Image (cartoon, helix red, strand yellow):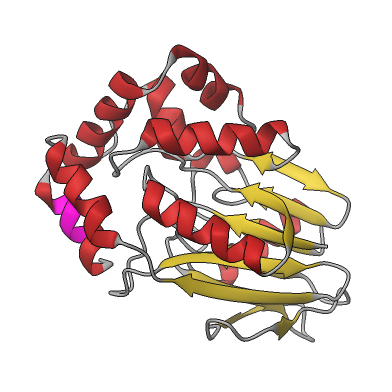
Amino acid sequence: MLTALLSDIHGNLEALNACLGHARERGAERFGFLGDLVGYGADARGVVEIVARYAAAGAVVLKGNHDEGIEEGSGYFNDAARAALQWARETLTEEQKVFLASLPLIVRQETVCFVHASAAAPERWDYIDSPAAAKRCTDAAETCYTFCGHVHDQVLYFENAHGRMSEFRPFPGTAIPVPSHRRWVVIVGSVGQPRDRNPAAAYTLFDLAGQKLTFFRVPYDAMAAADKIRHCGLPSSLAYRVELGI
């Protein structure tokens, strides 16, 4: 059974729909949403509506730092991010706010761990940006496979023969063997705001039975998503980031 892992959607409805369609076409039957459903983009309400339906059907859904910002405040975010969070607060329904507030920070299911940031103190929102950080994450997860978001990138870390973590940069669309005798930390990429100068949405497919992993980039109408950001009066910098993938 294939599992689609999607993270950092950030209110980008066009990117979310493109990734969900792409995943279903490839046979995905399970879904995991690894946090940051809101923030930056114009469609927080539409994104949360879709993800809540998937949650009701059994999908794993986690809380990200921007989701937490809806209830806890946004003091440590920059001005543009704070503006987007305020827009989300104004447009989300009360039921959707309760849904976001109820989401867990981390979920473990047998050999798999799901977390937005790091399994080592997930509430601190630390970034997995080095092999050392990946090692702390997998040690805390105590599972074979750990799936994370938060970094807005696609990176695979694996445990080498010396017990240390090594970094691998995947090529989109190429299946990677991930045998269970090693430990793996998978940074699945950002659906709604990639930052590698490629605006195509990013997500990952995981085949647990086949022990394979495939990272994908999915083209979508980024201009439409950016135009919505401008139309609702959010900072133009947020629109440029979506258009240019920065």
- Front one among 160 and 24: 24
- Front one among 34 and 183: 34
Q: Would residue 65 appear left or right of 240 to someone viewing this image?
A: right
Where, by quadrant of the figure, is residue 229 drawn?
A: top left
Q: Position of residue 22 (x, y in %)?
A: 56, 65
Q: Give me the residue at 13% from left, 44% from top.
A: 230
Q: Position of residue 178 (x, y in %)?
A: 77, 78
Quadrant in the picture for the N terminus: bottom right
- Front one among 245 and 219: 219
Q: Give me the residue at 53% from left, 86% from top.
A: 171
Where, by quadrant of the figure, is residue 188 drawn?
A: bottom right
The magenta segment is 237-241
Q: Is residue 148 in sight in this rendering? A: no
Quadrant in the picture for the C terminus: bottom left
Q: Is residue 116 in sight in this rendering? A: yes
In the displayed structure, would residue 25 be above or below residue 103? below
**How many callouts does the rendering have?**
0
Q: Give me the residue at 51% from left, 15% from top.
A: 95
Q: Give me the residue at 79% from left, 56% from top.
A: 112
- Front one among 94 and 13: 13
In the displayed structure, would residue 234 be above or below residue 227? above
Q: Is residue 73 magenta?
A: no
